[in-house]
Image (cartoon, grey):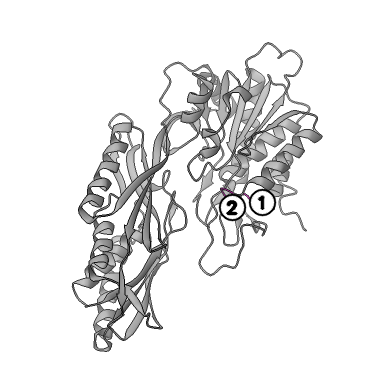
Amino acid sequence: MNKVLTNLEPQNVFKHFEALTKIPRESGNEKEVSDYIVEFAKKLGLEVIQEPCLNVIITKPATRGYEDKETVIIQGHLDMVCVKEEGYEFDFSKDPIPIVVDGDFIKTKGTTLGGDNGIAVAMAMSILEEKDIQHPEIKVLLTVEEETGMSGVHELNPDNITGNILINLDAEEEGILLASCAGGVNNIITLELNKRPVKYNTAFKLVLKGLIGGHSGTEINKRRANSIITLGRILKILDNKVDFELAAIHGGDKMNAIPNRSEAVIAIYNNDIENMKSSLLDIEQMLKLEYEVSDPNLTIEIEEVECPNEVYTNDNKLEIINILSLIPNGIQTMSASIEGLVESSNNLGVLREKDSTLIFSSSVRSSVSSLKDEINNKIQIICNLIGAEMILEADYPSWPYKIESEIRELMKTTYKEFFGKALKVDAIHAGLECGFLKEKIGDIDMVSLGPNLFDVHSPKERLSISSTERMYKFLIEVLSRI
């Protein structure tokens, strides 16, 4: 197989990154990549631990003269969000990611890239392999299932890793050093479904498509349309204009990705077809105007389909529409202390029918735990009113800002000398594993950084080549100065 990234610098980093694109890494399917990293460490003669959950911990001894320096943990996660463009034939369980180079960017031909967080893994592997750099003892920690609830770091055995400094490589904007992040929890609503024989004689599939989607943490502030919420709004408006039965509804792929496509199947009388089409055209024009900046390609596609035998009861239809109308969505509060920082939010990422139930899966995030509770309380009230059930899963803590940080100050000084400009210290609304790591390892000095990544968790994801080179050289320099 031809290699795409051979001539890019730093060669070692991109060599490893390309190798990772050929290995399945979807959350929950990390066995092959975990084994690959273990074998890589063994070939280098390094001490390696593979935990039962498939986390990998590798130790590289300090170079001469650095034996008495503080141990540095370099940390990232092995898994990736797997999303593809509509209609694109691709199997994430076996097909290599179709990477291409486009100017300064590594992109794909229709899938997520896995730069989040494959570039961290590739950088860590390169550092382990480097023979001509100076550094203190390094421990590389690569976790699993970060994207679906952080179960890997949750199951991390603290006896397997110690250190004084932790550098997380899961940030996505060069020149910004993260020193705090939001916590979060997965909110799952289950609605019992009741079906009855269809009364009407014609059925249509309504598809809301063309939305951009994106990362529900870092891109929630871009106010992009959530296809599930917006489809609920479409049905609500349509219900006031046309008498229809709802036969099916689903949307989204990942809880932590803003859904970019959703669809529903409705049944109507023949004599209501033109009214339905006219109403949907008006709704489409209204939405295009509202989202002309964030989602300019928004489209409502109408396709006649075979009429189903069963539909949801009218009560069920109203319950579904009401949940989608009332559930908190998008930004809920902005930080009063950090300008421009989203403080709390909710993203309804997946809607699926399963075993006679409809499941609404949301990712709730907040840097203030009480506000996270407030969002969940509002959703619980909706469930109480409608008769649905709510559970919370994969609760993860926030990472609070540390007033005193030697590694943060060292990085600020080094960055200024290296690039002639200030390194910005910031917080992020997305969840990082740093909160759990603080609980597991103790009051360790932590920062998070990374090269420029854009549109992660979407098929438009792209990684800057030049930024990767700069950030890798910067990281090597920082290690030499500790």
The quadrant of the image that shows the N terminus is bottom right
The amino acid pointed to by label 1 is Thr
Residue 211 lies, in percent from the top left, at 41, 62
Residue 109 lies, in percent from the top left, at 60, 62
Q: Which mark is residue 315?
A: none
Comparing 152 with 134, the one in front is: 152
Number of disc labels: 2
- Where is 242 relative to 224, above or below? below
- State the separation of the CA atoms marked 1 and 2: 8 Å
Q: Which mark is residue 21?
A: 1
**Residue occupying image coordinates x 41% and y 44%:** 217
SS class, disc 2? loop
- Where is 65 relative to 394, above or below? above
User: Is 480 left, or right, of 214 in this rendering?
Assistant: right
Disc 1 vs disc 2: Cβ atoms closer than 8 Å? Answer: yes
Residue 293 lies, in percent from the top left, at 35, 58
Q: Is residue 286 visible?
A: no
- Residue of label 2: 113
The quadrant of the image that shows the C terminus is top right
- Where is 322 relative to 74, above or below? below
* Quadrant of the rendered image containing residue 68: top right
**Residue occupying image coordinates x 76% and y 39%:** 39
Structural crowding at the residue carrying mark 1, measured as other residues with C-alpha within 10 Å and reported as few (<14), some (14–19) or many (≥20)? some
Residue 144 lies, in percent from the top left, at 58, 40
The residue segment tinted magenta is 23-28
